[in-house]
Image (cartoon, rainbow, N blue to C red):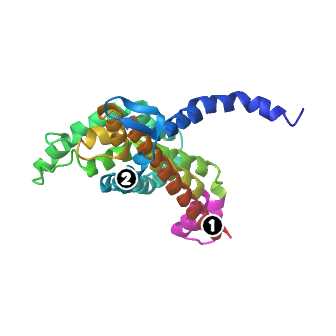
Amino acid sequence: MKKASPWWLSGPALLLFAALLLVPLALTAVLSFNVYDPATGPRADEFTLEHYTHVFTDSYYHGIFWRTFWISGLVALICVLVGTPEAYVLSRMRNPWRSVLLLVVLAPLLVSVVVRAFGWSMLLGPEGLVNGSLKLVGLGPVKMLYTETAVVIALVHVMLPFMVIPVWTSLQKLDPGVENAALSLKASHFTTLRRVVLPQVMPGVLSGSLIVFGLSASSFAIPGLLGGRRLKMVATVVYDEYLHELNWPLGAAIALTLLAANLVVMLSYNRLVEGRYKKALG
């Protein structure tokens, strides 16, 4: 009876997880194999691999997946380079300044992503604040709206808190006395950061970068509003297939392909970084 107690306690959470995630995912998987008839829509009584074949063999989708993943990787890299030092500074600050900076870091999460995207569209537009400032110094105007640059800038702004918080949490476990001990033994600040601090924050950097990459790859609002109709990413293509073309099976196939590709990239990255981390500690 005691062995069954954990299952009884976790049963409601497992049922909720299955109802909200596994069941819709399974239904989407079944839908992706349905035959699509332009006249009548998806046909649940017939199954085909045509949609997956279309996704894997069409160069149009290859380009969209490549754009999605390189933008997501770039956003994750920038968030690591900006968010890790920011989290380190945050962990070394004292109240009330720590609370103020933490509020600044979390502020983007308090505003709807659509509002943030519209805000960036106003800033980066032909008559926006950025181009207005460039005109004053004789460098403008520069086309930024509806470009990959605009998408990357807005995604970094949205995703940065998801990098700062995991790194900051890892730094909370680090005893400042360890750093002071290294400095007292004549280690330079750079050596202390590299040999003492960085190994301790690597789990936070790893989890933060994975979260940022996954959320960026599946982002819809920012690519849709700042990328325009020509600069498509996978989420905007899925939206088009579902609501414009009404080809739900193809949209489901693209969405599941993105999920599978995301899992492969994230698990490979996790294995690579964790392997190097353990090797460095060993």
Q: Nearer the viewer, residue 132 or 111?
A: 111
Q: Position of residue 85 (x, y in %)?
A: 47, 55
x then y, percent, for residue 210: 51, 51
**Secondary structure mainly formed by the magenta segment:** helix
Question: Quadrant of the image for the C terminus?
Answer: bottom right
User: Which amino acid, by three-letter code, is at mark 1?
Assistant: Ala
- Can you tell which of label 1 and label 2 is closer to the viewer? 2
Which residue appears farthest toward the right when viewing the image? 1
* Residue at x 83% of width, y 32% of height: 5
Residue 184 makes an appearance in the image: no
Disc number placed over residue 65 in the picture, else none: 2
Please give the residue where the numbered disc 1 appears in the rendered image.
Answer: 182
Q: Which residues, given as a range, are shown in magenta?
A: 178-201
The residue at 73%/32% (across/down) is 10
Q: Position of residue 136 (x, y in %)?
A: 11, 48
What crowding class fits label 1: few (fewer than 14 Cα within 10 Å), some (14-19), or many (20 or more)? Answer: some
Q: Earlier in the sequence, mark 1 or mark 2?
A: 2
Query: Considering only vertical position in the picture, is 124 above or below 139?
Result: above
Amino acid type, mark 2: Phe
Residue 192 magenta-highlighted: yes
Question: Is residue 111 rendered to the left or right of residue 232?
Answer: right
Compared to residue 156, the image places residue 26 above or below, namely above
Q: Nearer the viewer, residue 243 or 208?
A: 243
Residue 256 percent location from the top left of the image = 47, 44
Asked where in the image residue 35 lies, by quadrant, the reply is top left
Instruction: Estimate how packed mark 2 is, as few (under 14), some (14 to 19) or many (20 or more) residues with alpha carbons within 10 Å.
Output: many
Are dots 1 and 2 in contact, CB under 8 Å?
no
Apparent side of residue 115 relative to residue 140 in the rendered image (left or right): right
